[in-house]
């Protein structure tokens, strides 16, 4: 049985960070997952309303499957879901899935706002796309982001989630009891990278809370 700390844990292990940013509404959400992530991402996205800021996602998956996975999600969710394209400007109500052949990064767009950037650079943590690459790119924009690390084997995304938290973003890791493999989230929790550790079924509601500017002080 999961302990109360597994069900909803607020980490106090992270270094000091800019708490003043915590009452700002997030302008982008970044999500990473691996083993078990297709169902976890589906559950989170299905519970999100259509009026969300842009969402960028990395799911470890061979490139021949990412486009069909995005289409499947698009048919199940209120959000528009698609495979990300290089240089594509981000729009509210849309979720962008990294193609299986490239890293996905959050980049500033000319004239303001954000866009997708794709890179066929070297694998990171043995993965391309890598969750860490996405999260580190989002960390450059600090409190504008909410970062979510879901079920998966290994450690990809843990350092990136820590970078996000240090930059002032709100960060969430999936808890042990609801993970298929509590690997990536476990590594993030061990680093003090997660502001919250939540069951899968509660993650969407907490994303919405922070997207709409709900103030929750970071206990670090």
Image (cartoon, grey):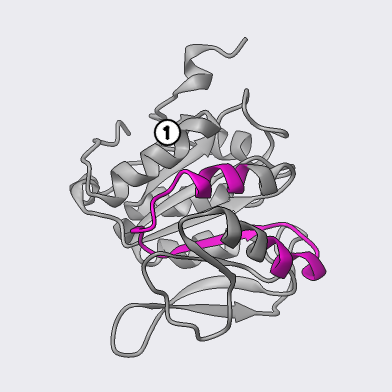
Relative vertical location of residue 3 with respect to residue 37 in this rendering, above or below: above
Question: In this orientation, does residue 174 appear?
Answer: yes
Residue topped by disc 1: 196
Where residue 53 appears, as percent x and y from the top left, is 36, 62
Where residue 66 appears, as percent x and y from the top left, is 72, 66
The kind of secondary structure element at disc 1 is strand
Relative vertical location of residue 95 with respect to residue 209 in this rendering, above or below: below
- Is residue 1 toward the left or the right of residue 51 in the image? right
Where residue 59 appears, as percent x and y from the top left, is 67, 56
Magenta extent: 40-69
- Is residue 132 toward the left or the right of residue 111 in the image? right
In reply to whether residue 182 is colored magenta, the answer given is: no
Q: Quadrant of residue 39?
A: top right
Q: Quadrant of residue 178?
A: top right
Question: In this orientation, does residue 193 appear?
Answer: no
- Is residue 45 toward the left or the right of residue 167 in the image? right
């Amino acid at each position: 049985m999961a302990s109360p700390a597994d069900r909803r844990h607020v980490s106090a292990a992270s270094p000091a960070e800019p708490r003043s940013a915590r009452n700002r509404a997030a302008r982008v959400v970044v999500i990473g997952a691996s083993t078990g992530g297709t169902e976890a991402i589906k559950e989170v996205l299905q519970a999100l309303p259509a009026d969300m800021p842009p969402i960028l996602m990395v799911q470890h998956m061979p490139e021949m499957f990412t486009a069909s996975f995005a289409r499947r999600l698009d048919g199940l969710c209120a959000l528009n879901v698609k495979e990300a394209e290089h240089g594509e400007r981000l729009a509210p109500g849309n979720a962008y899935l990294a193609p299986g052949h490239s890293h996905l990064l959050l980049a500033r767009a000319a004239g303001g706002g954000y866009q997708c950037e794709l890179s066929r650079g070297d694998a990171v943590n043995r993965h391309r796309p890598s969750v860490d690459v996405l999260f580190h790119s989002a960390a450059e924009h600090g409190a504008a982001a909410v970062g979510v690390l879901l079920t998966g084997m290994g450690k990809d995304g843990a350092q990136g989630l820590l970078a996000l938290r240090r930059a002032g973003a709100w960060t969430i890791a999936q808890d042990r009891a609801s993970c298929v493999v509590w690997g990536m989230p476990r590594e993030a929790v061990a680093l003090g990278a997660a502001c919250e550790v939540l069951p899968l079924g509660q993650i969407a509601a907490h994303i919405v809370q922070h997207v709409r500017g709900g103030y929750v002080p970071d206990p670090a």
